Every structure is written in C-alpha cells, then in structure tokens.
C-alpha cells in the first residue's frame, strides 16, 4: 500500500515518497472511487458540495467532520440511497451518478447505516440472507426458478455461516436480531454487508454506541478486511479510532472537503481546527442570539 500511516517522530512531517500531498482534492495512485463536483441541497441548505475526492484502492479512509458536516449525506448520494443535485462520481471507472443503490451494490460498493438497519423480528441468519438479496435488488426471479434458487440458497446460507463464524455470531444465529446488543447489531450489519463480497465498504459510524471490547473487535475486523484487499471508507467521531486504523483522513465541514491527508497531518491542520472549533451545533450559539 502506498499510504503510510506511521507518524514520523517529532516536528513537521517530511513529505514521504509515494504519499499524496495533504491537500483537499489531491490525486492518488490507483483511485477506486472518484468524486467530481458532487452537490446535494435541501431547500436553501447546501448539505454537500465536494469539488473533487479520490479514495485510493486498498486503503482505510476515515471521513470526519463536525455534526451536520454532510458526511452521511455524501454516503447516501454516492451509494445511490439519495439523489445528487449535480456532479459525477465513478467506481472502478464505472460512472455511478443516477444509478440506484442495488445497481451500485452490484458493482461492489456497499454501505452500512449510522442507525443500524437490522430487522428485529428476523433471526440473525435471516438478516444475513436478506443482505444477500436486498443489496442486489433480486426478488422475482428466484421464485420462478425453484431448483436454481435452492442451489443458490445453499450457497448463500454457507456464505452467511462462514461470516457469522468470522464475526463470532454463530451462537446467535437463530436468535431474533431484536435481542442483540447495539454492538452485536453493528457486527451483524458489517457481516451482512459482506454477503455480496463487496470491493469497497462505506461504513457510517460503525463503532457508535459500541462498548470498548467490541470496538476493538470491530477495528480488528476492519483492518483485516483492508489487509485482504477491501477498500474501506468509514465515518467516525472518535479521533483515537481514526488515528488508530486510518491510512488516510478526509475532513468535511459545511458540506465541503476542507482537508485531507495522512492521519498525522490532520491534528495540526488549520482548516480542521477551524471546522471543529468554529461550527459545532452541540455548542451554545454565539452571544446575543438567545431565542
Ligand atoms: N433529508 C434531509 N432533509 C433536510 N436536511 C437534511 C436532510 N438530511 C440531512 N440534512 C441536513 O444536511 C446537513 C448534513 O447532514 P448529515 O446528516 O449529512 O451530516 P453528518 O456529517 O452525517 O452529521 P453527524 O456527524 O451528526 O451524523 C445537516 O445540516 C442536516 O440537517
Ligand atoms: Mg451522519
């Protein structure tokens, strides 16, 4: 991998050969996902306005930024769960703008949600099986071709069991997903996202609300997936997590990409400091604006 997350000891990091410059919109070697002029507005609010962003294949990219920065909206647009107002983006050279989510998933770009979307009244296994079909938008055909469907179903069940084993969820296989802890549901959602053997995962706050032990386990799973060749982009608020596993960090504020670079360049970046100190909507508004 070309991006080296290691922090050089002391002082300003020297530019490293093969590592893209820490500048918003910088080109990267072997970009898998490329965004150009992607915008999404809600009424008068510009939720996303990203001029250019490349995600390098085989890396873990953290997408950070204050609440309301546009991270989830960007994920929604790119993965086809929301429409863009403008812009182009491509995955492995394939233009994605205007394509529905199930088509995008079929190309190998699969995302998870900030609020988990497991179905409480289905079992863990059933949630996994549903992941295989819902992401691809398959419905009618298997019903018309029962023998083919049965063979496919066996294959899908085998894949589900293999993943449940990997994520240590086998003992919960036949439990209703509604009985799982928040952390277990996050694991299930990650396992389910892998049912279709994606090329790239977009994970929206995969560690939110997860206890420290399960967080460690999730981090291990994510780095293992990267080491197996998957490309991962994840949204995260915990900077220890971001610094711990990211090869690259992209920072959004007010819908824009305000900074990007290797993790060790981010903390000292002026635009990042401004983004976090200037506009946190969980802080009191400026004086004199009392309702
Ligand atoms: N469906 C919608 N309708 C109207 N406004 C929306 C909608 N979805 C998002 N927004 C607005 O767009 C902006 C970006 O929201 P978004 O959820 O993408 O932020 P975020 O970076 O994911 O924040 P957080 O870290 O809190 O999850 C916010 O101002 C939000 O209120
Ligand atoms: Mg969000």
Image (cartoon, rainbow, N blue to C red):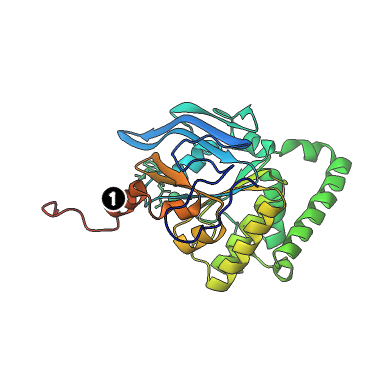
Q: Which residue in the structure is indicated by mark 1?
A: 279
Crowdedness near tag 1: few (<14), some (14–19) or many (≥20) residues, C-alpha within 10 Å = some
Q: Is residue 212 visible?
A: yes
Q: Nearer the viewer, residue 80 or 59?
A: 59
Query: Which residue shows up at 47% across the image and 35% down it?
Result: 25
Q: Position of residue 167 (x, y in %)?
A: 69, 64
Q: Nearer the viewer, residue 9 or 89?
A: 9
Q: Position of residue 180 (x, y in %)?
A: 60, 68
Q: Nearer the viewer, residue 87 or 260?
A: 260
Query: In this rendering, is residue 192 above or below 168?
Result: above
Query: In this rendering, is residue 282 above or below 50?
Result: below
Query: Which residue shows up at 65% across the image and 47% down it?
Result: 1
Query: Which residue shows up at 48% across the image and 46% down it?
Result: 261
Quick one: SS at disc 1?
A: loop
> Residue 168 lies in what quarter of the image?
bottom right
Q: Position of residue 188 (x, y in %)?
A: 64, 60
State yes or no: Cβ of the residue under disc 1 lies below 8 Å from any atom of ligand 1. Answer: no
Query: In this rendering, is residue 216 above or below 290?
Result: below
Side (left or right) of 175 relative to 280:
right
Q: Is residue 174 visible?
A: no
């Amino acid at each position: 991998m070309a991006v080296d997350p290691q922090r050089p000891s002391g002082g300003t990091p020297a530019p490293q050969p093969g590592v893209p410059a820490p500048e918003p919109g910088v080109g990267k070697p072997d970009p898998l996902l490329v965004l150009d002029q992607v915008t999404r507005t809600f009424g008068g609010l510009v939720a996303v306005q990203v001029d250019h962003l490349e995600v390098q294949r085989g890396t873990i990219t953290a997408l950070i930024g204050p609440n309301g920065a546009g991270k989830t909206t960007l994920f929604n647009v790119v993965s086809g769960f929301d429409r863009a107002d403008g812009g182009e983006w491509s995955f492995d050279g394939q233009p994605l703008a205007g394509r529905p989510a199930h088509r995008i998933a079929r190309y190998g770009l699969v995302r998870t949600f900030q609020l988990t979307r497991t179905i409480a009244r289905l079992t863990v296994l059933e949630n996994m099986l549903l992941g295989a079909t819902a992401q691809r938008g398959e419905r009618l055909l298997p019903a018309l071709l029962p023998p083919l469907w049965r063979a496919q179903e066996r294959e899908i069940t085998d894949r589900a069991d293999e993943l449940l084993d990997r994520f240590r969820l086998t003992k919960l296989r036949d439990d209703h997903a509604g009985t799982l802890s928040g952390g277990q549901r996050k694991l299930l959602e990650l396992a389910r996202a892998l049912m279709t053997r994606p090329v790239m995962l977009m994970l929206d706050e995969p560690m939110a609300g997860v206890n420290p032990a399960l967080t460690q386990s999730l981090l291990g799973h994510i780095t293992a997936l990267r080491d197996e060749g998957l490309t991962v982009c994840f949204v995260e608020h915990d900077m220890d997590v971001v610094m711990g596993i990211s090869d690259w960090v992209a920072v959004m504020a007010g819908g824009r990409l305000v900074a990007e670079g290797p993790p060790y360049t981010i903390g000292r970046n002026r635009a990042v400091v401004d983004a976090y100190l200037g506009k946190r909507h969980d802080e009191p508004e400026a004086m004199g604006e009392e309702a």
